[in-house]
Image: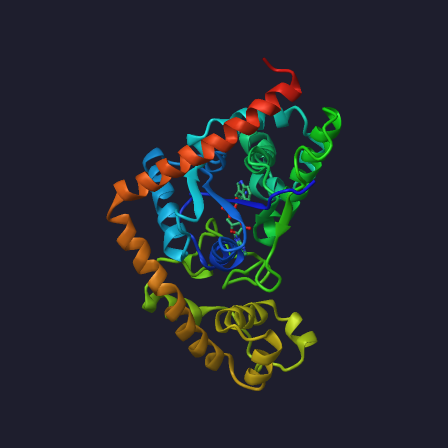
Amino acid sequence: MIIKKLAFSGVQPTGNLHLGNYLGALKNFVSLQNEMDCIYCVVDLHAITVFQKPSELTNNVLETTASFLATGLKPEKSIIFNQSSVAGHTELAWILNCISRIGWLNRMTQFKDKAGSDKEKASVGLYIYPNLMAADILLYKATHVPVGADQKQHLELSRDIAQKFNKDFNCENFFPLPEPLIPKKVSRIMSLRDGAKKMSKSEESDYSRINLKDSADEIKKKIQKAKSDSEPIPDDSKILKQKPEALNLLTIYSEITKKSLAQITSEMAGKKYSYLKENLAEVLIEEITPVGKEIQKLLKDKSHLKNILENGTEKANIIAEENLKIIREKVGLI
Ligand code: TYM
């Protein structure tokens, strides 16, 4: 049986998108548009697993949509829409809640990280969040899922759920097992302040990340203040691995300049980090500030952004309803 390739991915509208989202996910979203059908979703239902101020959430949905467009997603090529506008996501999520096992969810490390020490106080939504993610993907029978490394475990769970559904309802290959597409070099961009933590929207210090909307000055300051090392840049990759902040800066530089890490390290070996930082700030400003300017420009015309989401919803809904009809039959729902 030939299965048509289809990519699906989602981004939470929980504030500024940053360099980690850009290198780990969005750039991949854009290049996949030329390889297969793609569906990209602003996952507002995932966002509310942690309380969001309603007016901020609405704005953030539009801003995430603007960020999709500003990085190069084209509504003519990809379906771009908002998760809560397609009711099938929550219906399938419920069905999958009944397929997924408590033991599987108990292994999810992101829940443990996000719930913190007082798990009893976390929302039930946060706990079953990975089941909703599986529903997002399986609703469209997506075959490929471009994500950063932090989503790998959730993708494995989606595969387990798909497999159990196919087995329970005796329909081998009904749901394809979605394949994660995780970029090799930039799968986990780290915080600029702490090389042990990933760059994230939720980290308190804005100096820990480069936001897509940062000005040239902000990018320069953040890179200058980024944690590095007092020793000159080593040429030995084993030594570099022990210096996660330095490795992170070199990795970002290598990705933006499209040169290999080995080449960058040998070019920079023996130099001070201030030299790397100067060069890194320059290439980042060149790459990121046009994206930020485009986001600001797009945000001036909110009705245009809403139109794009509405058109995307219509297209997504057709696929979702077609698949759901069969899913309902398989489960025995009338
Ligand atoms: P979210 O909104 O946290 O992140 C969006 C995407 O950015 C990637 N990412 C990173 N990549 C590299 N380095 C980083 N520091 C970094 N931080 C974030 C994430 O891996 C992700 O690809 N649960 C998902 C959203 C989601 C989803 C889905 C994804 C909901 N349904 C279905 C794929 C398929 C999330 O919270 O991503």
The residue positioned farthest toward the front in the image shown: 1
Above or below, comparing residue 334 to residue 67 in the picture: above
The residue lying at 26 percent from left, 54 percent from top is 297
User: Which one is nearer the viewer's eye here, 220 or 213?
Assistant: 213
State the image quarter where residue 58 is shown: top left
The image shows residue 84 at horizontal and vertical percentages of 44, 31
The residue positioned farthest toward the bottom in the image shown: 270
User: Which one is nearer the viewer's eye here, 281 or 303?
Assistant: 303
Relative placement, left or right, of 98 versus 322 is right
State the image quarter where residue 4 is shown: top right
Above or below, comparing residue 272 to residue 66 in the picture: below
The residue lying at 48 percent from left, 70 percent from top is 256
The image shows residue 81 at horizontal and vertical percentages of 42, 39
For the N terminus, the image quarter is top right
The residue positioned farthest toward the top in the image shown: 334
Above or below, comparing residue 210 to residue 91 in the picture: below
- The reply to whether residue 123 is visible in this rendering is no
Picture mark count:
0
State the image quarter where residue 323 is shown: top right
- The reply to whether residue 330 is visible in this rendering is yes
The residue positioned farthest toward the left in the image shown: 300
